[in-house]
Image: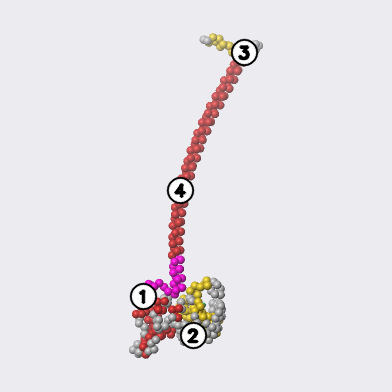
Amino acid sequence: MKNRFTITISDVHGVRHYTFNQLVKRFFWWVVMGLVILAAISLALIWGLRQEVQLLQQKRAEALARYEQLLEQRAGELSAYQAATQKLQQELDAKGQHLENLDAAVAALEAMLGAEPEDDTAPLAQRVENLKLTMGEKRYLLQVIPSGRPVQTFKGVSSSFGWRKHPVTSKREFHKGIDYRGKLGDKIIATADGVVEYAGYHKSSGYGNMVLIDHAFGFRTLYGHLKKVLVKNGQVVKKGDVIALMGNTGLSTGPHLHYEISFIQRSLNPAPFVAWDLKHYDAIFKKARHVPWDSLVERVKQYIQAVAPPSLPAMSTSRAN
Ligand SMILES: [Zn+2]
């Protein structure tokens, strides 16, 4: 027991002896215990803080999710609204387009028939009838406005006015005239008095040898695919004059006459003009509706009265039918 350091403690319970070794051991034990407790407290604190952080993070995530959800909802509402607006606009556009298409279809149909709606011009026929044309006035109109057939001998029609597949190009196109059957050399006649505007070969139109005649009041007639042209530019022709011979020139598959009537640049269906005569006089006013018949007829009446007053019965009663 050399150099052993001893501490003696005496109190009411008695006397106790502690060796230095024991004291050191105890001291270390307390230190270790203290450290363990400190560590435990720290761990508990850390755990607690971490819990709190986790809770906060969770809350933040929840808030963020809620916010995003709200945003999404708003975006959804907005896009739904935008989609609804767009749909409405599309419907409006479609309606507009539909109306335009309808208009175009009606216009095409009118162009094809060479007619406008009944109601529009129903009073026109009435107005023309009210003008009560004399025989002289009727004869004059039939002389200066295209009427009757452009062929001296009728051998049938191979193609009428309207949409068709072109016999040479096979393309769908609007046939602006009537095609008359016949033989090479058949006589072609002018359908009204007028002045020859064009006589000769016309390449770009495909009509080959062609005659174009200017008539009174804005009418024109065209005669195509001719074998031989018998008139010259600027020549004045009379209704019934032989102006050409039937041929097969230009874009044509066989001998025929292509006959067109136009009124101020607009192609008209020639059929009612071909059928127009003294016996079937009024039909033309209902069928060729793009022509301002009432003002035209009134002008003719004034002209006839000026050159042959009705008091002279010569023009109005003679040669009826
Ligand atoms: Zn034709």
Q: Which mark is on residue 27?
A: none
Residue 91 image-quadrant placement: bottom left
Q: Which mark is on residue 74?
A: 4
Q: Is residue 317 above or below residue 57?
A: below
Q: Decide: marks 1, 4 in contact (CB < 8 A)?
A: no
Name the residue beneath numbered marker 3: 5
Q: For label 4, count other residues whose C-alpha is less than 10 Å away and answer few (under 14), some (14-19) or many (20+).
A: few
Which numbered disc, 2 or 4, marks the residue closer to the eye? 2
Q: Is residue 20 magenta?
A: no
Provide residue 224's location: percent of width, then percent of height.
52, 80
Toward the viewer: 196 or 185? 185
What type is the residue that disc 3 sits on? Phe
What type is the residue that disc 1 sits on? Pro
At horizontal 53% and vertical 27% (from top left) the residue drawn is 41
Residue 309 visible in the current orientation: no
Q: Earlier in the sequence, mark 1 or mark 4?
A: 4
Mark 1 residue element: helix
Which numbered disc, 2 or 3, marks the residue closer to the eye? 2
Classified by dominant secondary structure, the portion drawn in magenta counts as helix
Which numbered disc, 3 or 1, marks the residue closer to the eye? 1
Q: Is residue 260 above or below residue 45?
A: below
Q: For label 3, count other residues whose C-alpha is less than 10 Å away and answer few (under 14), some (14-19) or many (20+).
A: few
Q: For label 2, count other residues whose C-alpha is less than 10 Å away and answer few (under 14), some (14-19) or many (20+).
A: some
Q: Earlier in the sequence, mark 3 or mark 4?
A: 3
At horizontal 56% and vertical 78% (from top left) the residue drawn is 253
User: What span is in magenta?
Assistant: 100-123
Q: Which mark is on residue 123?
A: 1
Name the residue beneath numbered marker 2: 152
Q: CA distance from mark 2 to mark 3?
A: 160 Å
Q: CA distance from mark 3 to mark 1?
A: 146 Å
What type is the residue that disc 2 sits on? Gln
